[in-house]
Structures are given as C-alpha cells and as structure tokens.
Image: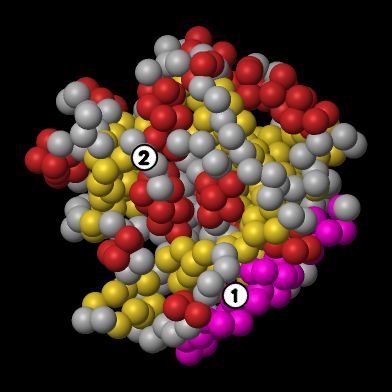
Amino acid sequence: MPGKKVLVLGSGGREYAFAWKFLKDKEVEEVYCAPGNGGTKSLCTNLSLDINNHKQVLEKIIDLGIDLTVVGPEAPLADGIVDYLESNGAKVFGPDQYASQLESSKLFARDIMDEHHIPQPRYKKCSSIQDAIEIKNSWGLPLVIKADGLAAGKGVIICKDERSFDDAMNIMFENPQFGEASRDISVEECLFGEELSIFAVCDGDSYKILNTAQDHKRIFDGDKGPNTGGMGAYSPTPLSTKDIILKTEEKIIKPILKAMKDRRHPYKGFLYIGIMIVDGDPYVIEFNVRMGDPETQVVIPLLDSSLYSLLDDCIKGRLGSTTLRISKKTAVTVVLAAKGYPNSYSKGMKINGIEKINEGLVFHAGTDFTDGLLTSIGGRVLNVIGFGDSLIDAIDSTYKAVDKINFEGKYFRKDIGQKGLNYK
C-alpha cells in the first residue's frame, strides 16, 4: 500500500514542526510545504504557492495527488480555505470559515461564550473612542483592549493607566495599525492569575487533549516590553493540574463543541484554549483555531504516536477510538530572533552553528536557503528545542544548544521556562 502524501500550508516554525513529525510517520511517504522556509527546503519539498489563493492550492493538491492538507496559520482558515477545499473533494484538516470566527472575531467568540455560560472576563463591544472611554469610566483601569479581527497575535493591549489607554485608542482608532481588524474592539476586564495554553484536537463531537504549554509573549526578560508572536515556550506546565484540566473540559471545551454543533458548524481541527487561572478556576482569555507558534514546537515533539492517524481519525469522526501516546519528558523552545524584532529588523544574516547541535532540535522559522547559504529573512529566525526528564534539565539543554548558533544581531530571551520553576 503506497505511503500518504501530506501538504502543510504555512512558512513558520509551526509548519516546520508538522513537516518534521509527518516525515517520522510510517504512513507518510512524501511531505510538501507551501511556501515553507529555508529549513523545510532541505527537509521536504517546498512549493511556491500563494496559500491565500484557494484555486491554486486545489490545483496543486490534485496535480500531486495529496492525501491530506494541514492548514498551519489562521488567515487562510478565516478566509474559508477549508470550505473551498472540502467542497472540491480534498481532505483537509482545520475548521470551516464559520467556526474559525472563534479566532478571527474576538467579539464572535465572546458572544458565543456568553450565550453558553462559558467562564470569561466581562467584555463590551466598542466601535469608537468615546464608547471605550465610557467603559473605562464605568469599570476603571486596568482594562484589556483587543482588536476584534486578526492582528498577527499583536492586537491585544493591557492598559494599566491613562497613558497606556490613550496609546491603545491611538493604535486601534486614531492611527489604526491593524486596519479593518480594529474597526470594532473588545474592551475587557483585566483578570489576574496565571496563563495556561491547552491544546486539543476535535472531530466535531469528541476531543482529545494533546498537551499543555506556556508561551512567553513579550520581547524582554521578565515579561517586559511589547507583545511578539512568541519568544519561547515549554511543555507541559505545572499549572496543568488534573483539577484544572477537568474544569477546562467540563466548563469550556465540551460547551464550545456543543455550541458549534448546535449552529451546524461542528468544530473539526486543532483548538487552542488560552485560559487564565483565577482562584483555581479557568477563564477563557482567547481561542485559537490552530496550533500556537512557538507552542507547537514543544507540543508536537512530545507526541509519540502518529500525527497522520490522529488527524485522519479527526476528519473521519472517529477520534473516540484513537489512542494518543504522549512523552513523559519536558520540552523547552527558545526563539532566536533578529535584533529589532517585533519592530523593524535586519534580514540576510548568515546563520552558523546548527551543525554543532547533537542534542535537541532546531526548527526553522524565518530562514532562507539559497546557493548553499542559510540566511535570516524573518523576525523570528529559529526555534531551538531541548528536552529533559525535568523542566530544569530541559532548560539547561536548550540554552546549551542556543549558545552554539550564531548570526549577526541574534537576540533571545534568557528566562524561558523560569515561570514553571517558580510554580514548582
């Protein structure tokens, strides 16, 4: 029986992690990435495709005889690529356009959670500065301001004082940095507690939890500076107690799956539940309708069973009979970024030292490989992953590998995983 052909859509570290995992799968013969990056170029076959051009993607799926397409980033999901591919007979893993609103519209998600009594912070839709000021005057500061639409993980501003609130109003309304995404905003109560990310796979009726992780969003050590796409993560986290997982399942995952099924758009795909733990109870900070980046880079390597079989069972609605095997080890990833990220940064720096890594993994993100030369082309350049029987061992392993890789302006946080040590 011939092996399966898999197409991974996207170009970051998350997509590299998927490709790497599929290539270890005995059921998979060939892996393609579109458009991929400098690392996937040598790992599998990169395709020069515009993943937002649904017709072009479908033609390539047919031409290559692709058995499974996996959508990495959120934008194509929000744009309805799953609906288009499925309606044309292609097997694709990810939620449809309607269900993808759980991420592509913060207010859609908040409204549906409100309707189904899923625990979340207080929120109000605001369409102008005056609307937001009225809420601020009524509720007081601090507040969380979120662009309603997709903003590449950067559309959330915590307003602790009047100055940061004014800055948020400028970013959202006066000189909008996120375009149509901030035409409406969600003004939310600021919860205080510990953040935890829980990753599940769903087949419309049932679900299985892949693992938990904690991301480090801010650019500087000690969680200071502006938000980024993520500077590192570790998995699992000590915050994910049996009690918290059970409460998240009963109060959040099961109700949201029922809500989507009741609306005739059963949720099929990865579901990322970002929660805040307040006095021992989980509250939804956000849903993502895909795997996180860089959390994927620690969650997927800890999956010891077949990723292809798991996603295939999800699509076929038989997740209940799937057996997951999850490693007992801890994984840590540190993002190596270009100096200046998340603002303007240099490109084209030569990368050295990856060949010196003999323990752990290096997943490519913003890289290019041309004429035998590996260079940086993105803000987040590489993900270095280490493993250990404990969190402290995994942290040590990761940073030893980080020290071996060099490029001009290399920047990374030096405290990834330290929160987990503090929880212990």
Query: Residue sitting at 38 percent across and 86 percent down?
Result: 350
Residue 228 is situated, as x and y percent measured from the top left of the image, at 57, 63
Query: Residue sitting at 45 percent across and 59 percent down?
Result: 13
The residue that label 2 is drawn on is 26
Q: Visible in this render: residue 138?
A: no
In depth, the one of 219 and 66 nearer the eye is: 66
Q: Earlier in the sequence, mark 2 or mark 1?
A: 2
Q: What element carries label 1?
A: helix
Query: Residue sitting at 35 percent across and 84 percent down?
Result: 348
Range covered by the magenta-colored residues: 395-423
**Quick check: 134 above or below 41?**
above
Disc 1 residue type? Ala
Query: Residue sitting at 81 percent across and 36 percent down?
Result: 241
The residue that label 1 is drawn on is 401
Query: Taking 85 as reference, is 241 left or right?
Result: right
Which mark lies nearer to you, 2 or 1? 2
Disc 2 residue type? Lys
Q: How crowded is mark 1: few (under 14 residues within 10 Å), some or many (20 or more)?
A: many
Residue 199 is situated, as x and y percent measured from the top left of the image, at 59, 38
